Image: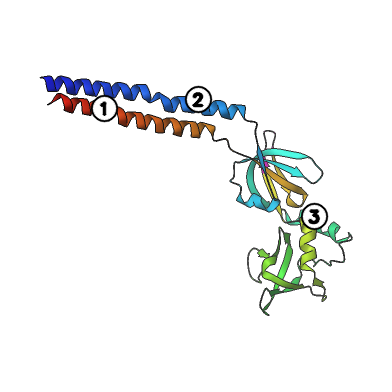
């Protein structure tokens, strides 16, 4: 009988301790939330091309080259319609591009693969971020060939494209790109041409709530183990 009473008391103490001390995780969660609320929102600036690593649905701020900003949720990238790109590309060709002669859209250009002497001829569709869009004859769609894989580009007229100067002009937004960043704001869905973007800002997530909860849960676990050890120890002593 005495042993049963002690066992029951031990279980009651353990259960009471569990209910009592499990509040640490709840308290930690509340404290973490309070810390998060007290912290100002912080943003991390990214280079334009790093938007490729941003998860769709992430809240971002697009900083344009003219200083204006567009805020909303990142949807993804879309190709600019061919007609729109052709119009922008024609205007670009009329500008002074530091002696860089751009290939004509639709012509077949010859490029040499980096670190080899292998030459390939492909139909030219335009520039994308740090890449040329080319299409193999017979293919349904063109695809990007990155400048890191190209050592030389020559058009049908024998003009050699200065790759490094072209990359510089692209980074300055002087050559139109085939990709647009799609962003969804409260007002509407919008496509922003990548050459018009100066940088991307992504809000840094606050981790106070999670940290507070984990610390509280760890304390709960320690107290729970200690309370059970004490309870079973008391029960064992009672059997002697």
Identify the residue under disc 2.
30
Taking the view exactly as shown, the residue that stands out farthest to the bottom is 117
Locate residue 37, reporting x and y percent: 59, 27
Instruction: Please identify, in this view, whether the residue under mark 2 or under mark 1 is nearer the observer.
Output: 1
Quadrant position of residue 238: top left
Assign a secondary structure to mark 2: helix
Q: Which mark is residue 172?
A: 3
**Image position of 12 with respect to 149: above or below:** above
Locate residue 212, reporting x and y percent: 49, 31
Q: CA distance from mark 2 to mark 3?
A: 47 Å
Locate residue 8, reporting x and y percent: 19, 21
Mark 3 neighbour density, 10 Å: few (under 14) some (14–19) many (20 or more): some
Provide the residue span drawn in magenta.
183-188
Q: CA distance from mark 1 to mark 3?
A: 70 Å
Q: Quadrant of the C terminus?
A: top left
Instruction: Please identify, in this view, whether the residue under mark 2 or under mark 3 is nearer the observer.
Output: 2
**Total marks in image:** 3
Locate residue 145, reporting x and y percent: 67, 66
Assign a secondary structure to mark 1: helix
Residue 134 visible from this viewpoint? no
Tell me what residue is drawn at x 59 percent, y 45 percent: 56
């Amino acid at each position: 009988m005495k042993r049963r009473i002690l066992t029951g008391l031990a279980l009651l103490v353990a259960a009471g301790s569990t209910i009592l001390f499990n509040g640490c995780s709840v308290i930690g969660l509340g404290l973490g939330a309070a810390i998060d609320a007290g912290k100002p929102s912080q943003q991390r600036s990214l280079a334009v091309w790093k938007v490729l690593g941003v998860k769709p649905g992430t809240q971002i701020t697009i900083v344009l080259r003219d200083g204006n900003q567009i805020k909303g949720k990142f949807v993804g990238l879309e190709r600019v319609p061919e007609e729109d790109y052709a119009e922008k590309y024609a205007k670009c060709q009329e500008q002074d591009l530091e002696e860089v002669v751009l290939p004509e859209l639709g012509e077949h250009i010859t490029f040499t693969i980096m670190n080899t002497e292998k030459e390939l001829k492909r139909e030219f569709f335009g520039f994308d971020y740090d890449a040329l869009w080319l299409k193999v004859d017979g293919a349904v769609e063109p695809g990007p060939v990155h400048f890191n894989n190209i050592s030389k580009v020559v058009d049908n007229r024998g003009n050699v494209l200065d790759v490094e100067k072209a990359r510089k002009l692209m980074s300055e937004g002087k050559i139109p790109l085939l990709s647009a960043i799609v962003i969804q704001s409260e007002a509407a869905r919008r496509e922003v041409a990548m050459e018009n973007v100066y940088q991307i800002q992504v809000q840094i997530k606050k981790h106070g709530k999670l940290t507070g909860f984990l610390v509280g849960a760890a304390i709960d676990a320690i107290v729970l183990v200690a309370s059970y050890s004490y309870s079973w120890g008391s029960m064992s002593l009672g059997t002697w």
